[in-house]
Image (cartoon, helix red, strand yellow):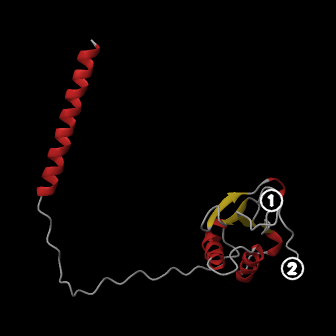
C-alpha cells in the first residue's frame, strides 16, 4: 500500500513538473508587443511632490506626513541621535511642546541608545509616534491610540525642559 502511494505521488510530481515546463516554454515563445515611440522620446513628466503642512485643526493621520517629513530631515542630519533635535524640529513646524514625549539619547551605561522614540499627543485619543536608531536603521512613524493618562510612550521619558 505504501509503495503504491509513493509511486502515485512520484507520478503526480513528474506530471506537475512537465506541465510547469510546458507553460514556461509557451510563455517564452509568445510574441512580445513592439515598443511604441522611438528611443529619443521625451519621458513622461514626473508627478510633482506633494506639499506637506501642519494642520492644527486636522487629525493625527492628516498630520502624519508633516510629522514624518520633519523627523526624516533630522534623521538625515548630523543630529540623528539627539532627541532634542526631533522635538525642536517638530515644535518648529507647529506641534505643541506640552504634548510631546521623548526617550533618552543614552543608555543606562552611557552608550548611544539603540532606539530613540518621540511622540506628540494629538487630541483626546491619538498619538503621533516616531522611532529611530540603530535598531530600526531608518525612521519609523505611526499613529497609535493614547495610553492611560494621555501618555504616548511606555516607560521612562526625559523632561522636555529646554
Mark 1: which secondary structure?
loop
Q: Which residue is mark 1?
A: 151
Point 84% across, 59% down: residue = 156
Q: Nearer the viewer, residue 78 or 59?
A: 78
What residue is shown at x 15% (from left), y 67% (from top)? Answer: 33
Q: Name the spot of residue 91 as percent of width and height, x first.
A: 75, 79
In the figure, residue 89 lies in which quadrant? bottom right
Q: Earlier in the sequence, mark 1 or mark 2?
A: 1
Determine the CA span between mark 1 and mark 2: 20 Å
Name which residue lies at 23% across and 27% down: 10
- Mark 2, residue position: 162
Relative to 88, say whether 14 is above or below: above
The residue nearer to you, when weighing 33 against 78, is 78
Establish if 3 lies above or below 128: above
Q: Residue at x 30, y 84 (%)?
A: 43
Find the residue positioned furthest to the top. 1
Q: Position of residue 97 (x, y in %)?
A: 81, 75
Quadrant into which the N terminus falls: top left
Q: Crowdedness of circle 2 by 10 Å Cα count: few (<14), some, many (20+)?
A: few
Instruction: Count the marks.
Output: 2
Q: Circle 2 sits in a helix, a strand or a loop, which is it?
A: loop
Amino acid at each position: 500500500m505504501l509503495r503504491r502511494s509513493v509511486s502515485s505521488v512520484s507520478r503526480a510530481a513528474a506530471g506537475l513538473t512537465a506541465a510547469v515546463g510546458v507553460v514556461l516554454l509557451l510563455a517564452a515563445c509568445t510574441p512580445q508587443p513592439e515598443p511604441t515611440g522611438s528611443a529619443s522620446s521625451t519621458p513622461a513628466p514626473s508627478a510633482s511632490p506633494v506639499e506637506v503642512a501642519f494642520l492644527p485643526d486636522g487629525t493625527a493621520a492628516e498630520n502624519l506626513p508633516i510629522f514624518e517629513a520633519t523627523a526624516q530631515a533630522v534623521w538625515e542630519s548630523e543630529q540623528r541621535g539627539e532627541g532634542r533635535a526631533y522635538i525642536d524640529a517638530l515644535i518648529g513646524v507647529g506641534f505643541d511642546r506640552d504634548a510631546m514625549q521623548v526617550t533618552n539619547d543614552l543608555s543606562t551605561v552611557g552608550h548611544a541608545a539603540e532606539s530613540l522614540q518621540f511622540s506628540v499627543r494629538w487630541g483626546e485619543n491619538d498619538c503621533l509616534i516616531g522611532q529611530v536608531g540603530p535598531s530600526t536603521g531608518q525612521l519609523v512613524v505611526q499613529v497609535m491610540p493614547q495610553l492611560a493618562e494621555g501618555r504616548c510612550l511606555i516607560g521612562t521619558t526625559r523632561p522636555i525642559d529646554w
